[in-house]
Image: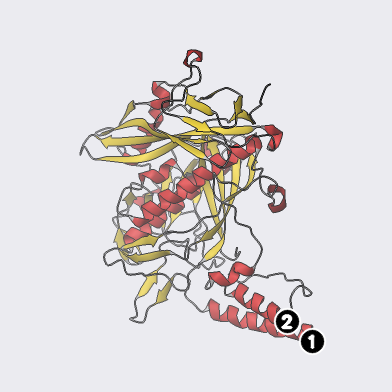
Amino acid sequence: MRQRVIMVRPGAVGVGGLTLLLLTACGAADNGSATDRLPEFTPAPTAPAAAPGGSAAATGSAPTEGPDGATGRVVLRAYQGWWDAQIAAFGQPAADPVALRGYAVDGALSGSLITRQQLLDAKLVMTGSPRNSPLVKSIQSTGNPPTAIVEDCLDVTDWHQADAGTKAVRDPSPRLTRYVATATLRKSDSRWLIEDFKREEGRSC
Amino acid sequence: MLRTARRILVRVLLLIGMLAATISPAGAEEPGGSVNPCAVRDICIIVHEPGSTASGHPGGKTETAAAKCVWDGVERPCWNDQLGWFSNSTGCYYMLMQPKPPADHRAWGGRDPATGEIYNVSCLDSSSAARGPQFFAQAPAGPPPTDNVVALRKEALEMLHIAPPKMHAAPAGKAVVGAPVWLWYDRSAASVGPLTGTARGNVISVTATAWVEDVVWDTDDFHTVGCKGAGTPYRADLGRTESPDCEHVFRSSSAHRADGTLYLTATAIWKVKATRSDTGQSVEFDYPVPSATSMPLQVAEVQVLN
Protein backbone atom coordinates (compact mmCIF):
# COMPACT_ATOMS: atom_id res chain seq x y z
CA MET A 1 0.00 0.00 0.00
CA ARG A 2 1.19 3.46 -0.69
CA GLN A 3 -0.58 5.09 2.23
CA ARG A 4 1.53 5.61 5.25
CA VAL A 5 1.14 7.07 8.67
CA ILE A 6 2.41 10.59 8.89
CA MET A 7 3.13 11.52 12.44
CA VAL A 8 2.14 15.05 13.25
CA ARG A 9 2.32 16.49 16.71
CA PRO A 10 -1.22 17.68 17.53
CA GLY A 11 0.13 20.86 19.08
CA ALA A 12 2.26 21.71 16.10
CA VAL A 13 -0.50 22.64 13.67
CA GLY A 14 -4.16 23.53 13.89
CA VAL A 15 -6.93 21.17 12.81
CA GLY A 16 -7.10 22.77 9.39
CA GLY A 17 -3.40 22.41 8.91
CA LEU A 18 -3.55 18.84 10.13
CA THR A 19 -6.21 18.02 7.57
CA LEU A 20 -4.18 19.50 4.78
CA LEU A 21 -1.04 17.71 5.85
CA LEU A 22 -2.70 14.33 6.09
CA LEU A 23 -4.51 14.67 2.80
CA THR A 24 -1.52 15.83 0.88
CA ALA A 25 0.56 13.09 2.43
CA CYS A 26 -1.98 10.59 1.22
CA GLY A 27 -1.99 12.03 -2.26
CA ALA A 28 1.76 12.38 -2.27
CA ALA A 29 2.15 10.12 -5.24
CA ASP A 30 -0.08 12.32 -7.34
CA ASN A 31 0.96 15.74 -6.22
CA GLY A 32 4.61 16.19 -5.56
CA SER A 33 4.55 19.91 -4.88
CA ALA A 34 2.16 19.49 -1.99
CA THR A 35 4.66 17.29 -0.22
CA ASP A 36 7.23 20.05 -0.08
CA ARG A 37 5.90 21.18 3.24
CA LEU A 38 6.86 17.93 4.90
CA PRO A 39 10.24 18.70 6.39
CA GLU A 40 11.36 15.09 6.50
CA PHE A 41 14.38 15.29 4.32
CA THR A 42 16.80 18.04 3.46
CA PRO A 43 18.21 17.46 0.02
CA ALA A 44 21.92 18.11 -0.18
CA PRO A 45 23.56 19.49 -3.26
CA THR A 46 25.20 16.88 -5.40
CA ALA A 47 28.95 16.48 -5.48
CA PRO A 48 31.22 18.25 -5.62
CA ALA A 49 29.47 21.31 -4.23
CA ALA A 50 28.74 19.61 -0.92
CA ALA A 51 27.32 21.67 1.87
CA PRO A 52 29.97 23.11 4.16
CA GLY A 53 30.63 20.83 7.09
CA GLY A 54 28.60 21.03 10.23
CA SER A 55 25.22 20.00 8.86
CA ALA A 56 26.29 16.37 8.56
CA ALA A 57 25.49 15.37 12.12
CA ALA A 58 22.08 17.04 12.01
CA THR A 59 20.85 14.98 9.05
CA GLY A 60 22.42 11.71 10.18
CA SER A 61 24.65 11.52 7.17
CA ALA A 62 28.30 10.69 6.58
CA PRO A 63 30.95 13.40 7.11
CA THR A 64 31.37 15.87 4.26
CA GLU A 65 34.94 16.77 5.25
CA GLY A 66 38.15 14.87 5.82
CA PRO A 67 39.09 11.60 4.07
CA ASP A 68 35.54 10.22 4.47
CA GLY A 69 34.12 13.37 2.91
CA ALA A 70 36.42 12.89 -0.10
CA THR A 71 35.31 9.24 -0.39
CA GLY A 72 31.71 10.38 -0.12
CA ARG A 73 32.10 12.70 -3.09
CA VAL A 74 33.59 9.85 -5.15
CA VAL A 75 30.58 7.73 -4.14
CA LEU A 76 28.15 10.50 -5.15
CA ARG A 77 29.90 10.94 -8.48
CA ALA A 78 29.46 7.21 -9.17
CA TYR A 79 25.79 7.40 -8.17
CA GLN A 80 25.12 10.44 -10.36
CA GLY A 81 27.06 8.80 -13.21
CA TRP A 82 24.75 5.80 -12.96
CA TRP A 83 21.71 8.04 -13.21
CA ASP A 84 23.16 9.88 -16.20
CA ALA A 85 23.77 6.50 -17.84
CA GLN A 86 20.21 5.40 -17.05
CA ILE A 87 18.69 8.61 -18.41
CA ALA A 88 20.68 8.12 -21.63
CA ALA A 89 19.84 4.40 -21.88
CA PHE A 90 16.11 4.90 -21.25
CA GLY A 91 16.05 7.84 -23.66
CA GLN A 92 17.35 5.54 -26.40
CA PRO A 93 16.37 2.02 -25.37
CA ALA A 94 17.17 0.66 -28.83
CA ALA A 95 20.84 1.54 -28.32
CA ASP A 96 23.20 -0.87 -26.62
CA PRO A 97 22.99 -0.29 -22.85
CA VAL A 98 26.69 -1.05 -22.41
CA ALA A 99 27.45 2.09 -20.37
CA LEU A 100 25.16 0.92 -17.53
CA ARG A 101 27.52 -1.97 -16.82
CA GLY A 102 30.27 0.47 -15.91
CA TYR A 103 28.21 1.74 -12.97
CA ALA A 104 25.87 -0.97 -11.72
CA VAL A 105 25.98 -4.66 -10.84
CA ASP A 106 23.64 -7.28 -9.40
CA GLY A 107 20.09 -6.15 -8.60
CA ALA A 108 20.66 -2.53 -9.58
CA LEU A 109 21.94 -3.61 -12.99
CA SER A 110 19.13 -6.09 -13.56
CA GLY A 111 16.63 -3.35 -12.59
CA SER A 112 18.07 -0.95 -15.17
CA LEU A 113 18.27 -3.62 -17.87
CA ILE A 114 14.71 -4.88 -17.37
CA THR A 115 13.44 -1.30 -17.52
CA ARG A 116 15.28 -0.76 -20.79
CA GLN A 117 13.82 -4.05 -22.10
CA GLN A 118 10.29 -3.07 -21.10
CA LEU A 119 10.64 0.29 -22.83
CA LEU A 120 11.75 -1.57 -25.96
CA ASP A 121 8.87 -4.06 -25.70
CA ALA A 122 6.30 -1.29 -25.25
CA LYS A 123 7.88 0.89 -27.97
CA LEU A 124 8.40 3.67 -25.47
CA VAL A 125 11.27 6.02 -24.66
CA MET A 126 11.85 8.28 -21.66
CA THR A 127 11.88 12.02 -22.26
CA GLY A 128 12.98 14.79 -19.92
CA SER A 129 14.97 13.81 -16.87
CA PRO A 130 14.58 13.16 -13.17
CA ARG A 131 16.18 15.37 -10.52
CA ASN A 132 18.44 13.84 -7.91
CA SER A 133 19.42 15.16 -4.48
CA PRO A 134 21.68 12.39 -3.20
CA LEU A 135 23.30 12.38 0.20
CA VAL A 136 25.80 9.86 1.55
CA LYS A 137 24.24 8.27 4.64
CA SER A 138 27.13 6.03 5.61
CA ILE A 139 30.41 4.61 4.43
CA GLN A 140 31.95 1.39 5.71
CA SER A 141 35.51 1.90 4.51
CA THR A 142 36.90 -1.05 6.43
CA GLY A 143 34.39 -3.58 5.14
CA ASN A 144 35.36 -6.29 2.68
CA PRO A 145 34.36 -4.98 0.23
CA PRO A 146 33.86 -1.40 1.47
CA THR A 147 30.24 -0.31 1.12
CA ALA A 148 28.29 2.94 1.10
CA ILE A 149 24.64 3.92 1.43
CA VAL A 150 23.27 6.84 -0.58
CA GLU A 151 19.86 8.32 0.12
CA ASP A 152 18.26 10.25 -2.69
CA CYS A 153 15.21 12.44 -2.94
CA LEU A 154 14.18 11.47 -6.44
CA ASP A 155 11.93 13.87 -8.31
CA VAL A 156 10.61 12.17 -11.45
CA THR A 157 7.96 14.82 -12.21
CA ASP A 158 9.63 15.91 -15.45
CA TRP A 159 10.60 12.43 -16.62
CA HIS A 160 8.02 10.86 -18.91
CA GLN A 161 7.26 7.69 -20.79
CA ALA A 162 6.66 8.69 -24.39
CA ASP A 163 5.82 6.98 -27.65
CA ALA A 164 9.10 6.05 -29.35
CA GLY A 165 7.86 7.37 -32.68
CA THR A 166 5.65 10.37 -31.99
CA LYS A 167 7.22 11.27 -28.61
CA ALA A 168 3.70 11.79 -27.24
CA VAL A 169 3.67 11.37 -23.47
CA ARG A 170 2.30 8.00 -22.38
CA ASP A 171 2.75 8.04 -18.63
CA PRO A 172 1.16 5.44 -16.41
CA SER A 173 -1.59 6.86 -14.27
CA PRO A 174 -1.43 7.38 -11.40
CA ARG A 175 2.30 7.97 -11.48
CA LEU A 176 4.96 8.83 -8.98
CA THR A 177 6.40 12.31 -8.64
CA ARG A 178 8.80 12.48 -5.72
CA TYR A 179 10.01 9.99 -3.17
CA VAL A 180 12.97 8.71 -1.20
CA ALA A 181 15.23 6.04 -2.69
CA THR A 182 18.19 4.28 -1.16
CA ALA A 183 21.16 2.90 -3.07
CA THR A 184 23.80 0.51 -1.79
CA LEU A 185 27.22 0.71 -3.39
CA ARG A 186 30.26 -1.49 -3.05
CA LYS A 187 33.85 -0.75 -3.87
CA SER A 188 35.50 -2.88 -6.51
CA ASP A 189 39.17 -1.96 -6.94
CA SER A 190 38.92 1.84 -6.78
CA ARG A 191 35.45 2.03 -8.35
CA TRP A 192 32.14 2.33 -6.52
CA LEU A 193 29.39 0.23 -8.10
CA ILE A 194 25.67 0.52 -7.42
CA GLU A 195 24.54 -2.95 -6.39
CA ASP A 196 21.08 -2.32 -5.00
CA PHE A 197 18.46 0.39 -5.43
CA LYS A 198 15.32 0.53 -3.28
CA ARG A 199 12.46 2.92 -3.92
CA GLU A 200 10.46 3.99 -0.90
CA GLU A 201 7.50 5.24 -2.90
CA GLY A 202 5.53 6.04 0.23
CA ARG A 203 8.23 8.24 1.71
CA SER A 204 7.93 11.75 0.37
CA CYS A 205 10.72 14.26 0.54
CA MET B 1 -12.97 18.26 19.27
CA LEU B 2 -9.53 17.38 18.01
CA ARG B 3 -10.23 13.71 18.60
CA THR B 4 -13.44 13.88 16.56
CA ALA B 5 -11.62 15.66 13.77
CA ARG B 6 -8.98 12.95 13.80
CA ARG B 7 -11.59 10.21 13.66
CA ILE B 8 -13.13 11.83 10.60
CA LEU B 9 -9.72 12.14 9.05
CA VAL B 10 -9.00 8.46 9.58
CA ARG B 11 -12.23 7.66 7.75
CA VAL B 12 -11.29 9.98 4.90
CA LEU B 13 -7.92 8.30 4.69
CA LEU B 14 -9.50 4.85 4.61
CA LEU B 15 -11.87 5.93 1.86
CA ILE B 16 -9.03 7.36 -0.21
CA GLY B 17 -7.11 4.17 0.42
CA MET B 18 -9.97 2.07 -0.90
CA LEU B 19 -10.32 4.27 -3.96
CA ALA B 20 -6.62 4.06 -4.63
CA ALA B 21 -6.71 0.30 -4.30
CA THR B 22 -9.17 0.05 -7.20
CA ILE B 23 -6.75 1.73 -9.54
CA SER B 24 -4.80 -0.64 -11.70
CA PRO B 25 -1.24 -0.68 -10.44
CA ALA B 26 0.56 -1.30 -13.69
CA GLY B 27 -1.29 0.71 -16.26
CA ALA B 28 -3.94 3.31 -16.82
CA GLU B 29 -6.89 3.43 -19.12
CA GLU B 30 -6.68 6.26 -21.56
CA PRO B 31 -9.86 7.85 -22.89
CA GLY B 32 -9.40 5.86 -26.08
CA GLY B 33 -9.31 2.64 -24.11
CA SER B 34 -5.62 1.87 -24.53
CA VAL B 35 -3.41 1.27 -21.53
CA ASN B 36 -0.13 2.94 -20.79
CA PRO B 37 2.10 0.25 -19.45
CA CYS B 38 4.48 0.68 -16.56
CA ALA B 39 7.82 0.42 -18.29
CA VAL B 40 9.93 2.51 -15.94
CA ARG B 41 9.36 1.52 -12.35
CA ASP B 42 10.93 4.74 -11.15
CA ILE B 43 7.72 6.55 -12.13
CA CYS B 44 5.10 3.84 -11.54
CA ILE B 45 3.01 3.09 -8.52
CA ILE B 46 3.43 -0.60 -7.90
CA VAL B 47 1.27 -2.49 -5.45
CA HIS B 48 3.16 -5.35 -3.90
CA GLU B 49 0.59 -8.02 -3.23
CA PRO B 50 1.56 -10.87 -0.96
CA GLY B 51 1.87 -14.06 -2.93
CA SER B 52 2.35 -12.37 -6.27
CA THR B 53 6.11 -12.60 -6.13
CA ALA B 54 7.87 -14.93 -8.48
CA SER B 55 8.95 -17.93 -6.50
CA GLY B 56 12.49 -17.96 -7.78
CA HIS B 57 11.99 -21.63 -8.60
CA PRO B 58 11.10 -21.82 -12.25
CA GLY B 59 10.16 -25.04 -13.93
CA GLY B 60 13.65 -26.33 -14.43
CA LYS B 61 16.42 -26.56 -16.92
CA THR B 62 14.36 -28.13 -19.68
CA GLU B 63 12.03 -25.16 -19.72
CA THR B 64 14.54 -22.89 -21.37
CA ALA B 65 14.57 -25.28 -24.29
CA ALA B 66 10.86 -24.57 -24.78
CA ALA B 67 10.10 -23.80 -28.39
CA LYS B 68 8.39 -20.55 -27.49
CA CYS B 69 8.83 -17.92 -24.84
CA VAL B 70 5.69 -15.91 -24.21
CA TRP B 71 4.83 -13.15 -21.76
CA ASP B 72 1.51 -11.33 -21.66
CA GLY B 73 0.50 -13.16 -24.81
CA VAL B 74 3.48 -11.79 -26.74
CA GLU B 75 6.21 -14.06 -27.98
CA ARG B 76 9.77 -13.05 -27.19
CA PRO B 77 13.20 -14.54 -27.80
CA CYS B 78 14.07 -17.07 -25.07
CA TRP B 79 17.63 -15.77 -24.90
CA ASN B 80 18.39 -12.10 -24.34
CA ASP B 81 22.05 -11.02 -24.54
CA GLN B 82 21.57 -8.53 -21.70
CA LEU B 83 19.24 -10.44 -19.38
CA GLY B 84 19.76 -14.17 -19.98
CA TRP B 85 17.25 -17.01 -20.43
CA PHE B 86 13.53 -16.31 -20.05
CA SER B 87 11.22 -18.53 -18.02
CA ASN B 88 7.55 -18.69 -19.06
CA SER B 89 6.51 -19.86 -15.61
CA THR B 90 8.00 -16.96 -13.63
CA GLY B 91 8.23 -14.21 -16.26
CA CYS B 92 11.82 -13.70 -15.21
CA TYR B 93 15.15 -13.78 -16.99
CA TYR B 94 18.04 -15.75 -15.48
CA MET B 95 21.66 -14.88 -16.19
CA LEU B 96 24.29 -17.20 -14.75
CA MET B 97 26.86 -15.07 -12.93
CA GLN B 98 30.28 -15.99 -14.30
CA PRO B 99 32.75 -16.25 -12.76
CA LYS B 100 31.04 -17.37 -9.55
CA PRO B 101 30.75 -14.50 -7.05
CA PRO B 102 33.10 -14.88 -4.08
CA ALA B 103 31.92 -17.02 -1.15
CA ASP B 104 31.25 -13.93 0.97
CA HIS B 105 28.79 -12.46 -1.57
CA ARG B 106 25.49 -12.10 0.24
CA ALA B 107 23.62 -14.05 -2.43
CA TRP B 108 25.25 -17.27 -1.16
CA GLY B 109 23.62 -16.70 2.22
CA GLY B 110 26.44 -18.60 3.89
CA ARG B 111 26.08 -21.61 1.57
CA ASP B 112 29.04 -23.43 0.12
CA PRO B 113 29.59 -22.17 -3.46
CA ALA B 114 30.14 -25.80 -4.48
CA THR B 115 26.45 -26.51 -3.82
CA GLY B 116 24.98 -24.34 -6.55
CA GLU B 117 25.18 -21.24 -8.71
CA ILE B 118 24.20 -17.59 -8.47
CA TYR B 119 21.94 -16.20 -11.18
CA ASN B 120 21.11 -12.55 -11.68
CA VAL B 121 17.30 -12.52 -11.91
CA SER B 122 15.31 -9.84 -13.77
CA CYS B 123 11.52 -10.07 -13.80
CA LEU B 124 9.03 -8.52 -16.20
CA ASP B 125 6.33 -8.67 -13.53
CA SER B 126 6.85 -5.36 -11.77
CA SER B 127 5.30 -6.61 -8.54
CA SER B 128 7.79 -9.44 -8.36
CA ALA B 129 10.19 -9.24 -5.46
CA ALA B 130 12.55 -11.68 -7.17
CA ARG B 131 15.34 -9.51 -8.50
CA GLY B 132 19.08 -9.50 -8.41
CA PRO B 133 21.51 -12.26 -7.53
CA GLN B 134 19.92 -15.43 -6.21
CA PHE B 135 21.18 -18.84 -5.22
CA PHE B 136 20.01 -21.92 -7.10
CA ALA B 137 20.97 -25.46 -6.18
CA GLN B 138 19.46 -26.61 -9.46
CA ALA B 139 20.03 -24.60 -12.59
CA PRO B 140 16.90 -22.56 -13.43
CA ALA B 141 18.28 -22.00 -16.91
CA GLY B 142 21.12 -23.05 -19.10
CA PRO B 143 24.50 -21.36 -19.22
CA PRO B 144 24.83 -18.38 -21.57
CA PRO B 145 25.68 -19.37 -25.11
CA THR B 146 29.38 -19.15 -25.79
CA ASP B 147 30.20 -16.07 -27.80
CA ASN B 148 27.77 -13.92 -25.82
CA VAL B 149 29.02 -10.51 -26.89
CA VAL B 150 28.12 -8.89 -23.55
CA ALA B 151 30.21 -11.40 -21.57
CA LEU B 152 33.09 -11.13 -24.05
CA ARG B 153 33.09 -7.34 -23.69
CA LYS B 154 33.30 -7.63 -19.93
CA GLU B 155 36.14 -10.12 -20.21
CA ALA B 156 38.04 -7.89 -22.66
CA LEU B 157 37.60 -4.86 -20.37
CA GLU B 158 38.95 -6.83 -17.40
CA MET B 159 41.99 -7.86 -19.43
CA LEU B 160 43.03 -4.19 -19.71
CA HIS B 161 43.91 -3.91 -15.98
CA ILE B 162 43.26 -0.17 -15.85
CA ALA B 163 45.18 1.46 -12.99
CA PRO B 164 43.62 4.17 -10.79
CA PRO B 165 45.39 7.56 -10.76
CA LYS B 166 48.21 7.96 -8.21
CA MET B 167 48.04 11.65 -7.39
CA HIS B 168 50.70 14.30 -6.85
CA ALA B 169 50.64 18.02 -6.15
CA ALA B 170 53.31 20.71 -6.12
CA PRO B 171 53.85 22.17 -3.66
CA ALA B 172 53.27 18.81 -1.98
CA GLY B 173 51.32 18.69 1.25
CA LYS B 174 51.27 22.47 1.84
CA ALA B 175 49.99 25.03 -0.62
CA VAL B 176 49.40 28.77 -0.37
CA VAL B 177 46.24 30.70 -1.13
CA GLY B 178 46.43 32.40 -4.54
CA ALA B 179 49.47 30.46 -5.82
CA PRO B 180 48.95 27.84 -8.55
CA VAL B 181 49.17 24.23 -7.40
CA TRP B 182 50.33 21.76 -10.02
CA LEU B 183 48.24 18.60 -10.22
CA TRP B 184 49.28 15.38 -11.95
CA TYR B 185 49.29 11.64 -11.55
CA ASP B 186 51.81 8.90 -12.40
CA ARG B 187 51.80 8.32 -16.12
CA SER B 188 51.96 4.77 -17.48
CA ALA B 189 50.15 2.76 -20.14
CA ALA B 190 47.94 1.32 -17.39
CA SER B 191 47.03 4.77 -16.06
CA VAL B 192 46.53 6.75 -19.29
CA GLY B 193 46.33 4.15 -22.07
CA PRO B 194 45.92 3.33 -24.79
CA LEU B 195 45.29 -0.23 -23.70
CA THR B 196 44.04 -3.10 -25.82
CA GLY B 197 42.73 -6.54 -24.94
CA THR B 198 40.92 -9.25 -26.87
CA ALA B 199 38.54 -11.83 -25.40
CA ARG B 200 38.00 -14.87 -27.61
CA GLY B 201 34.85 -16.96 -27.85
CA ASN B 202 34.43 -20.00 -30.08
CA VAL B 203 33.65 -18.08 -33.21
CA ILE B 204 33.80 -14.37 -32.45
CA SER B 205 36.11 -12.25 -30.36
CA VAL B 206 35.72 -8.82 -28.82
CA THR B 207 38.56 -6.31 -28.71
CA ALA B 208 38.46 -3.52 -26.14
CA THR B 209 40.58 -0.40 -26.60
CA ALA B 210 40.70 2.19 -23.83
CA TRP B 211 42.29 5.59 -23.32
CA VAL B 212 41.90 8.46 -20.87
CA GLU B 213 39.73 11.22 -22.27
CA ASP B 214 39.46 13.59 -19.29
CA VAL B 215 40.56 13.80 -15.69
CA VAL B 216 38.37 15.42 -13.06
CA TRP B 217 40.09 16.62 -9.89
CA ASP B 218 37.90 17.21 -6.87
CA THR B 219 39.91 19.81 -4.94
CA ASP B 220 37.71 19.69 -1.79
CA ASP B 221 37.16 23.46 -1.87
CA PHE B 222 33.78 23.07 -3.63
CA HIS B 223 35.52 23.13 -6.99
CA THR B 224 36.42 20.59 -9.61
CA VAL B 225 39.20 20.98 -12.14
CA GLY B 226 39.01 19.30 -15.53
CA CYS B 227 42.30 18.31 -17.19
CA LYS B 228 42.86 16.71 -20.56
CA GLY B 229 45.27 14.05 -19.32
CA ALA B 230 47.52 12.97 -16.47
CA GLY B 231 49.01 16.48 -16.08
CA THR B 232 52.67 17.50 -16.06
CA PRO B 233 54.98 16.49 -13.20
CA TYR B 234 56.59 19.50 -11.51
CA ARG B 235 60.38 19.74 -11.43
CA ALA B 236 62.28 21.95 -8.99
CA ASP B 237 64.23 23.60 -11.79
CA LEU B 238 60.99 25.00 -13.22
CA GLY B 239 60.81 27.50 -10.36
CA ARG B 240 57.64 29.52 -10.00
CA THR B 241 55.93 28.70 -13.27
CA GLU B 242 52.45 27.58 -14.10
CA SER B 243 51.55 24.05 -15.11
CA PRO B 244 50.99 23.82 -18.87
CA ASP B 245 47.93 21.61 -18.51
CA CYS B 246 46.63 20.94 -14.99
CA GLU B 247 46.62 23.21 -11.98
CA HIS B 248 44.37 24.83 -9.40
CA VAL B 249 44.47 28.06 -7.44
CA PHE B 250 42.98 27.80 -3.94
CA ARG B 251 41.11 30.93 -2.84
CA SER B 252 40.84 30.25 0.88
CA SER B 253 42.83 28.51 3.56
CA SER B 254 42.02 25.04 4.84
CA ALA B 255 42.42 26.12 8.48
CA HIS B 256 38.70 25.91 9.23
CA ARG B 257 38.30 22.43 7.72
CA ALA B 258 38.41 19.07 9.50
CA ASP B 259 42.02 18.60 10.72
CA GLY B 260 42.90 21.76 8.80
CA THR B 261 43.38 19.71 5.67
CA LEU B 262 41.75 19.26 2.28
CA TYR B 263 41.49 15.80 0.73
CA LEU B 264 41.75 15.72 -3.06
CA THR B 265 40.66 12.98 -5.41
CA ALA B 266 41.13 12.51 -9.14
CA THR B 267 38.89 10.53 -11.46
CA ALA B 268 40.20 9.46 -14.86
CA ILE B 269 37.35 9.28 -17.37
CA TRP B 270 38.33 6.47 -19.71
CA LYS B 271 36.74 6.01 -23.08
CA VAL B 272 36.35 2.33 -23.96
CA LYS B 273 35.68 1.09 -27.47
CA ALA B 274 34.61 -2.54 -27.80
CA THR B 275 34.59 -4.06 -31.28
CA ARG B 276 33.22 -7.48 -32.23
CA SER B 277 35.15 -9.44 -34.81
CA ASP B 278 32.28 -10.83 -36.87
CA THR B 279 30.43 -7.68 -37.84
CA GLY B 280 33.07 -5.12 -36.96
CA GLN B 281 30.39 -3.27 -34.97
CA SER B 282 31.66 -1.29 -32.03
CA VAL B 283 30.26 0.47 -29.00
CA GLU B 284 31.91 3.28 -27.08
CA PHE B 285 31.27 4.14 -23.47
CA ASP B 286 32.67 6.18 -20.59
CA TYR B 287 34.34 4.29 -17.78
CA PRO B 288 35.35 6.52 -14.85
CA VAL B 289 38.20 5.26 -12.67
CA PRO B 290 38.75 7.24 -9.45
CA SER B 291 41.90 7.31 -7.35
CA ALA B 292 41.91 4.56 -4.72
CA THR B 293 42.50 7.01 -1.86
CA SER B 294 42.50 10.77 -1.33
CA MET B 295 45.51 13.11 -1.18
CA PRO B 296 45.85 15.43 1.83
CA LEU B 297 46.77 19.06 1.15
CA GLN B 298 46.91 21.99 3.56
CA VAL B 299 46.31 25.45 2.18
CA ALA B 300 47.69 28.39 4.17
CA GLU B 301 47.11 32.13 3.92
CA VAL B 302 50.06 34.06 2.54
CA GLN B 303 52.57 34.87 5.28
CA VAL B 304 54.14 38.28 4.84
CA LEU B 305 57.69 38.23 6.18
CA ASN B 306 59.40 41.48 7.11
Point 47% across, 75% down: residue: B24
Point 33% across, 64% down: residue: A122
Q: Quadrant of residue A199?
A: bottom right
Residue B161 visible in the shown view: no
Which secondary structure lies at badge 1? loop
Q: Quadrant of the N terminus of chain B?
A: bottom right
Q: Position of residue B173 (x, y in %)?
A: 61, 24
Residue A155 visible in the shown view: yes
Badge 1: chain ID: B
Q: Quadrant of the C terminus of chain B?
A: top right
Three-letter amino acid code of the residue under disc 2:
Val
Residue A15 — which label?
2
| Dot 2 crowding, Cα within 10 Å, few <14, some 14–19, many 20+ | some
Left or right of A51 in this view: A114? left
Check whether the beta carbons of the residues at disc 2 and disc 1 lie within 8 A of each other. yes
Q: Which residue is mark 1?
A: B1
Point 32% across, 40% down: residue: B284
Three-letter amino acid code of the residue under disc 1:
Met
Q: Position of residue B21 (x, y in %)?
A: 54, 77
Left or right of B13 in this view: A195? left
Task: Name the mark nearer the viewer: 2 or 1.
Answer: 2
Left or right of A187 in this view: B276? left
Q: Residue furthest front?
A: B306
Camera-nearest residue between B260 and A134: B260
Point 41% across, 24% down: residue: B190
* Cα distance between the residues tagged 2 and 1: 9 Å
From what the image shows, is residue B119 above or below residue B197?
A: below
Badge 2: chain ID: A
